[in-house]
Image: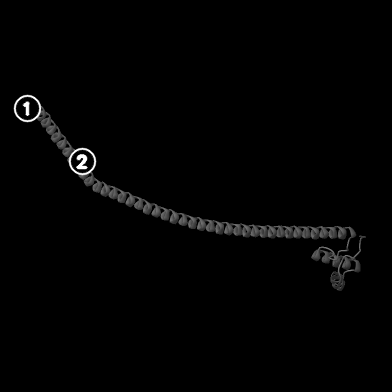
Amino acid sequence: MPRGDKSSYTDKQKRQAEHIEESEKEHGRGEDAAERIAWATVNKQDGGGKKRAPVKKATTTSSAKTATRKAAKTSTASKVAKKVAVKKTAAGRSVAKKASTSATKTTTTSAKKTTTKTAAKKATKATKKTATTSATTKTAAKKTAAGKTAKKSAVKKAAAKKAPARKATSKAATKKTVASTSTKKVATKTARRSTTRTPAKKSAR
């Protein structure tokens, strides 16, 4: 910027300088001195010209910076969106896994319950069968015992009936033997008598 160039000052600053310059002229200052004092006071108040001329390099760098910031923001936003999507998918998978595990658990528990029920029914049926078989075996044992006792009583009765018959037959046999022995004795006696008598008769003749 060349010396004395006021393009960087705003219209307001220029008006302030003109007003100060006029007041200094009224106080008896010259034009150069009044102008110098006016612009010195404006510079002292505002610290120089407030109007900044746009610089191409600065604009390019600022635009590049803004573009990089926007890109960074978009990248961070996309990253956040990706993370959220990943979290949502993970949550959905976890929910699906939980649902599947709960379904499998319910099916396994229902299957276990049904198996236990069927096992209990089978056990009750088996116990009933064993009870019936034990009852039948008991009744059969009772019947066999009753049959054995009946056989024993029948054998005893038959033996009791046969014993007096045997005794009677034995008595009859003994009587027969006694009679036969007595007849034999009588026969022998008669034979002896006859033998003793016959020689005497012969001698008498």
Residue sitting at the far top:
203
Residue sitting at the far front:
205
Q: Amino acid at mark 2?
A: Ala
Mark toward the start of the polypeptide (2 vs 1): 2
Q: Nearer the viewer, residue 66 or 93?
A: 93
Q: Is residue 146 left or right of residue 54?
A: left
Could you say whether the residue bearing mark 2 is in a helix, strand or loop? Answer: helix
Q: Residues within 10 Å of mark 1 (few under 14, many from 20)?
A: few
Residue 169: image tag: none
Query: If the image is split into quadrants, where does the N terminus sit?
Result: bottom right
Query: Distance from label 2 to label 1 (Cα)?
Result: 47 Å
User: Relative to 168, does residue 197 appear above or below in the rendering?
Assistant: above
Q: Which residue shows up at 44% across the image and 56% down it?
A: 128
Q: Which residue shows up at 52% across the image and 57% down it?
A: 118
User: Relative to 144, does residue 49 appear above or below in the rendering?
Assistant: below
User: Relative to 201, does residue 53 appear above or below in the rendering?
Assistant: below
Q: Residue 70 is drawn in which quadrant?
A: bottom right
Relative image position of residue 196 (x, y in whole percent): 10, 28
Q: Nearer the viewer, residue 148 or 39?
A: 148
Q: Residues within 10 Å of mark 2 (few under 14, many from 20)?
A: few
Quickly name the residue at label 2: 173
Q: Amino acid at mark 1?
A: Ala
Q: Nearer the viewer, residue 92 or 76?
A: 92
Q: Is residue 94 left or right of residue 9?
A: left
Quickly name the residue at label 1: 204
Q: Which residue shows up at 75% across the image and 60% down it?
A: 77
Q: Which residue shows up at 29% across the image and 47% down it?
A: 155
Which of the two discs, 2 and 1, sits closer to the camera? 1
Relative image position of residue 39 (x, y in whole percent): 86, 66
Could you say whether the residue bearing mark 1 is in a helix, strand or loop? Answer: helix
Relative image position of residue 173 (x, y in whole percent): 20, 41
